[in-house]
Amino acid sequence: MAQSALITGATSGIGKACALLFARNGYNVIITGRRKDRLSVLEKELKKCDVQVLSLCFDVCDRKAVFKNLESLPKAWQSVDVLVNNAGLALGKSPIYEGETKDWDAMIDTNIKGLLYVTRAISPFLLKRKKGHIINIGSIAGKEVYKGGAVYNATKFAVDALTKAMRIDYLEHNIRVTSICPGKTETEFSLVRFKGDAQRAKTVYEGYKPLTAEDIAEAVWFAASRPEHVTINDMLIMPTAEANTVYFHHS
Ligand code: NDP
Ligand code: 8X3
């Protein structure tokens, strides 16, 4: 039987690239996100790979919706082999003394609580089979802090801590836990962070070659496709032109 992957935040960027790559490798995929129209378009594209696709439209911050959608997965979809906790966002880039508390709530609710809700809701299926792989999308922002990044940084440091803690909790259940931590990757991330200001978002990726969503999907796939006795704990992937979140080589 084909293997399956559940990918949160598959309507754009890294999540969408992961869905396409897993489907091209013969995985059935469960795709999630809040934008139903995008899920429908992606579902059609994925089906061209001759795999099964299940689209679930919900907000990962909505605890009831997460559990309602995932606890009631059709039987044929319950044997999830890989969970990619990708849904996430940054909002704003201000010092704490000027930060929007609504933005803080959204980042904390999505990047930390959303990841936890999804993981908790899927866990019974993983535990039952005593196999599976949880892949959390962390960030360079979870390894080092930068000016204006405080709360986003804190959420990605939390993802780092949760990944390490999950690895201990799930050890006796034979479930692998990995974090994939990208540096600057050109997706809709900056457009979201700067609330639709396309001009400002564009400047983030100017003057150097950023990573693509496909670069990160390749890393996720590499981790997922290792033999069962091998776990990639953590992968930090940067554009060659980015030494850390401060130092860039602009050509
Ligand atoms: P995009 O904005 O392109 O994609 C984000 C995805 O997350 C969308 O599919 C969006 O779907 C989904 N999402 C956001 N909030 C929610 C929510 N509340 N409920 C459900 N889905 C949600 O950005 P990226 O692809 O770049 O981001 C993916 C992950 O990668 C994030 O966790 C981000 O922090 C991380 N990351 C990104 C980097 C970058 O430079 N781009 C670098 C390091 C890490 P929808 O709006 O339809 O709900
Ligand atoms: C996104 C990478 O450096 O823009 O997580 O915060 S960064």
Image (spheres, grey):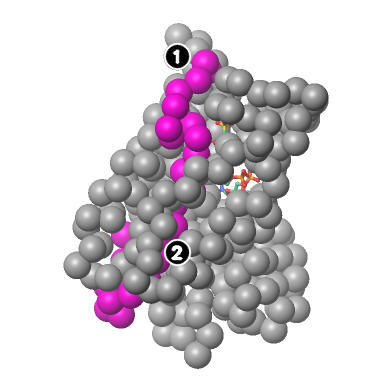
Question: Where's the C terminus, which quadrant?
Answer: top right
Q: Magenta part of the protein: which range?
A: 120-148
Q: Percent from the top left, x then y, of residue 28?
A: 57, 78
Ligand 2 sits in quadrant: top right
Q: Position of residue 47 (x, y in %)?
A: 70, 78
Which element carries disc 1, helix, strand or loop? helix
In the displayed structure, 143 sits above or below 110; it is above
Q: Nearer the viewer, residue 186 or 116?
A: 186
Q: At label 2, which amino acid type do we have? A: Leu
Q: Residue furthest bottom?
A: 1
Q: Is residue 166 left or right of residue 82?
A: left
Q: Is residue 81 visible?
A: yes
Residue type at tag 1:
Ile
**Residue under numbered circle 1:** 96
**Is residue 142 on the magenta stretch?**
yes
Q: Is residue 246 magenta?
A: no
Q: Is residue 216 left or right of residue 154?
A: right
Which residue corresponds to mark 2? Answer: 83
**Percent position (x, y) of residue 185?**
65, 40
Give me the residue at 57% from left, 72% from top: 29
Quadrant of the image occupied by residue 32: bottom right
Q: Is residue 149 above or below residue 156?
A: above
Q: Disc 2 or 1, which lies upstream in sequence? A: 2
